[in-house]
Image (cartoon, rainbow, N blue to C red):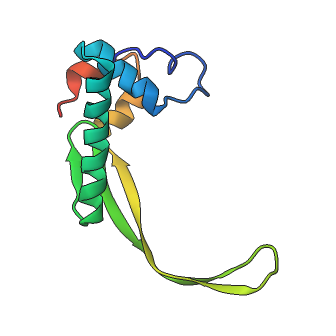
Amino acid sequence: MAEVAGAQGSPNQTMTKADLVGEVERVAELSRKEAEAVVETIFESIIEALQKDDKIEIRGFGSFRTRERRGRTGRNPKTGAKVEVPAKKIPFFKPSKELKDYVNNPQAEGSASAGAQV
């Protein structure tokens, strides 16, 4: 995978959306505005598909889908009163085997950018 400024280094750093836009801008040699449009389009497409209960599968990366969480009785932590929590859908990401391998062995032959196909 390409090195990302700001996301590499100590293991507790967080890659932000701005970092991702910067990486797309650098690698694809696009303007900042074009890179933002690319990242936004990808995120919006994933969100729209999940809203329609579609599954998104990106080979070599993973899949996104929704899962149904059933309703339950919860407790208000402040008052201790019982509260009904309604059923809802939650987004769920399942990483691919390749992604798991890259995460667990980042120095393996063939970088993520060479092995992953979108």
Residue 109 can be seen, yes or no: no
Q: Indicate the position of residue 56 as horizontal and vertical percent values.
A: 23, 52
- Nearest the camera: 79 or 3? 79
Please state, as top left, top right, bottom left or bottom right, where the N terminus lies in the image.
top left
Q: Indicate the position of residue 60 as horizontal and vertical percent values.
A: 24, 36
Q: Residue, x 23% and y 16% (percent of image)?
A: 28
Above-or-below relation of 50 to 86: above
- Nearest the camera: 54 or 117? 54
User: Which residue in the rendered view is the most extreme toward the left?
Assistant: 117
Q: Based on the displayed image, in which of its 4 quarters is residue 31 positioned? A: top left
- Nearest the camera: 25 or 69? 25
Left or right of residue 41, residue 80 in this image: right
Above-or-below relation of 82 to 35: below
Please state, as top left, top right, bottom left or bottom right, where the C terminus lies in the image.
top left
Q: Indicate the position of residue 53 as horizontal and vertical percent values.
A: 25, 66
Left or right of residue 84, residue 66 in this image: left
Left or right of residue 76, residue 99 in this image: left
User: Which residue in the rendered view is the most extreme toward the right?
Assistant: 79
Q: Residue, x 51% and y 17% (percent of image)?
A: 8
Q: Residue, x 46% and y 80% (percent of image)?
A: 87
Q: How many marks?
A: 0
Q: Indicate the position of residue 105 as horizontal and vertical percent values.
A: 41, 24
Residue 54 can be seen, yes or no: yes
